Image (spheres, rainbow, N blue to C red):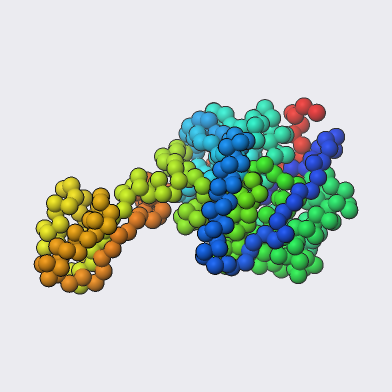
């Protein structure tokens, strides 16, 4: 269930006819959608982060949200959300259903007017400079917004023409994007016949006909199989390598962990945590030792033997009473001491080792709410833009903008 009353879509704005088109921009020869070795992916990711951080620090923040507020009737969906996204980096926006993620993105993308606070995208105010903001962004929702009766190539040419390219330039750009996104063989097939992963790739490609400063991806891998999700992940990494700022909302914790340079956690419309994945993991509990005895009846004795290694109450037996965790305040030294004591007591172990909390652990501890409490309260409110409103926004310049 989504966290605001608006459906997902892909939103792109044509360049105004009296404004020169900056022209097609270059992608790498191939957007990497192949399955490469973990080592190669890790090296590329590290290089991408370093390049993005250098690029972003020189250009300043591409996205600034300052105390954003949005209400639907008596319900406050977003309540004072603030964060910044340095240019050329990826921000992961996490939160349970109904947290306010999509409402926040819709305000940043000018699809909803804030009731309080302010925001700037690529230096433009989202209220007073909406037209300039729209020229600077690409927003892709959970479901591809494409003409299913057209082929992949025809969709790309259509978006190129809507974005101000002449026929020849639009066709040329379509061929470049088909090649870059590994869709050349499917170029003449109707989009209605595409697989979920192919739809997502052509959808993102349509938003890159003219280079955006900021890309909003609202749960882009929802409903995709693991292979297609990997394809989208590689595309996000390529965008970062090109210096394009990306704001990614997701409920897949491993996705945020893998792709994001920084993570903002939203719950009940408020920012409750911010930092890198490692910082958030350390904030929750840091590294710990997990001890799994061969005989669960030994857990009480193990607890007594290790009681002085952590403050009272910090040694925890899991709910199934099969394992015990101890904070590893001294890292491997704590682990060695545990093994020494248990070996001396002749306690047989099935497993023992150092563990770090996963982002799932962080998410659950920070949000601390049941599935029932995560009901999307805003879904029943009809105060947000309708499908027609979104269609009008996508293909009509802001009438209030100065020409």
Estimate the x, y position of residue 281 in percent, counting from the top left.
38, 49
Estimate the x, y position of residue 146 in percent, counting from the top left.
72, 56
Estimate the x, y position of residue 85 in percent, counting from the top left.
55, 39
Image: 385 above or below 340: above
Q: Work out whether residue 136 can be spotted.
A: yes
Q: Quadrant of the C terminus?
A: top right
Residue appearing at x 75%, y 62% in the figure: 179
Residue appearing at x 45%, y 46% in the figure: 276
Picture quarter containing residue 388?
A: top right
Image: 74 above or below 255: above
Picture quarter containing residue 104?
A: top right
Q: How many marks?
A: 0
Picture quarter containing residue 19?
A: top right
Residue appearing at x 28%, y 54% in the figure: 331
| Front in this rendered view, residue 377 or 25 | 25
Image position of 324 (left or right of 261): left
Estimate the x, y position of residue 150 in percent, counting from the top left.
79, 61
Q: Work out whether residue 383 can be spotted.
A: no
Image position of 228 (left or right of 281): right
């Amino acid at each position: 269930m989504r966290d605001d009353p608006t459906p997902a879509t892909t939103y792109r704005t044509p360049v105004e006819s009296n404004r020169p088109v900056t022209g097609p921009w270059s992608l790498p020869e191939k957007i990497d959608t192949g399955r490469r070795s973990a080592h190669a992916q890790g090296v590329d990711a590290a290089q991408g982060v370093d390049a993005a951080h250098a690029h972003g620090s020189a250009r300043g923040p591409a996205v600034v949200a300052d105390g954003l507020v949005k209400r639907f009737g008596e319900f406050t969906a977003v309540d004072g959300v603030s964060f910044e996204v340095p240019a050329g980096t990826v921000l992961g926006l996490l939160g349970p259903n109904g947290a306010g993620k999509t409402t926040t993105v819709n305000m940043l993308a000018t699809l909803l007017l804030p009731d309080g606070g302010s925001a700037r995208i690529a230096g433009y105010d989202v209220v007073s400079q909406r037209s300039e903001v729209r020229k600077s962004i690409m927003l892709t929702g959970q479901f591809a917004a494409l003409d299913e009766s057209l082929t992949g190539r025809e969709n790309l040419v259509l978006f190129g023409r809507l974005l101000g390219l002449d026929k020849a330039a639009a066709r040329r750009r379509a061929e470049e994007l088909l090649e870059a996104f590994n869709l050349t063989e499917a170029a003449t097939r109707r989009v209605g016949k595409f697989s979920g992963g192919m739809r997502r790739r052509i959808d993102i490609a349509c938003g890159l006909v003219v280079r955006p400063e900021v890309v909003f991806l609202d749960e882009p891998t929802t409903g995709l199989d693991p292979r297609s999700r990997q394809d989208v992940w590689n595309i996000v990494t390529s965008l970062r390598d090109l210096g394009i700022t990306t704001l990614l909302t997701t409920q897949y914790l491993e996705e945020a962990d893998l792709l994001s340079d920084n993570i903002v956690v939203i719950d009940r419309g408020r920012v409750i945590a911010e930092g890198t994945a490692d910082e958030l993991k350390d904030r929750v509990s840091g590294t710990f030792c997990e001890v799994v005895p061969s005989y669960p009846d030994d857990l009480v004795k193990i607890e007594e033997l290790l009681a002085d290694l952590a403050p009272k109450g910090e040694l925890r037996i899991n709910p199934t009473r099969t394992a015990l965790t101890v904070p590893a305040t001294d890292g491997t030294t704590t682990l060695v001491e545990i093994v020494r004591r248990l070996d001396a007591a002749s306690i047989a172990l099935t497993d023992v080792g150092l563990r770090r909390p996963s982002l799932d652990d962080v998410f659950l501890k920070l949000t601390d709410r049941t599935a029932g409490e995560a009901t999307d309260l805003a879904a029943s409110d009809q105060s947000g833009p309708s499908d027609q409103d979104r269609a009008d926004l996508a293909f009509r310049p802001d009438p209030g903008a100065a020409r």
